[in-house]
Image (tube, rainbow, N blue to C red):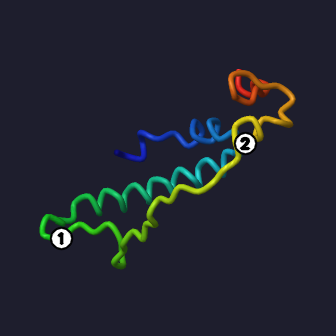
Amino acid sequence: MSSQGIDVQYVADLARLRLSADEVATFQKQLSDILGYVDQLQKVDVSSVEAITASAPTSNNLRTDELKPSISAEEALANAPVQSDNLFIVPRMVE
């Protein structure tokens, strides 16, 4: 991908940033430089390098599931202002 394919002003608009013409020019130069380095990295032969997922050995320390006493649905819903079918009824937050 070339730096010509990315418009700094378009990205600034998406981020709702107001940039001066000088800032756009500065960021376009910086973006061009960064993408130039990325182009250089893409040309490096890494076919003999083993992929790693972590810089240090890791393991999952998982606990066993244990059944423990809990409160009943009736107790959980005892102070609910609105409930139906053992569920809390809450106002819609997302339209």
Instruction: Using a 10 Å C-alpha cutoff, classify the residue at mark 2 as few (fewer than 14 neighbours), some (14 to 19) or many (20 or more).
Output: few
In the image, residue 71 sits, relative to residue 57, either above or below, namely above
Q: Amino acid at mark 1?
A: Val
Screen quadrant of the C terminus: top right
Quadrant in the picture for residue 85 = top right
* Left or right, residue 49 beside residue 90: left
Q: Indicate whether 55 appears above or below 62.
A: below
Whole-percent x, y for residue 56 in the image: 36, 79
Residue 7 left/right relative to 14: left
Q: Residue at x 45, y 53 (%)?
A: 32
Q: Front-most of 55 and 3? A: 55
> Quadrant location of residue 76?
top right
For mark 2, what is the residue? 18
Q: Is residue 93 left or right of residue 70?
A: right
Q: Position of residue 22 (x, y in %)?
A: 66, 51
Residue identifier under label 1: 49
Mark 2 to mark 1 CA distance (whole Å): 43 Å
Q: Earlier in the sequence, mark 2 or mark 1?
A: 2
> Is residue 29 rendered to the left or right of residue 93?
left
Q: Secondary structure at mark 1?
A: loop
Q: Point out the image quarter for the N terminus.
A: top left
Amino acid of disc 2: Arg
The residue closer to the viewer here, 13 or 64, is 64
Q: Position of residue 79 (x, y in %)?
A: 86, 37
Q: Observer-nearest residue: 44 or 61? A: 61
* Residue 39, horizontal then vertical, whole percent: 31, 56
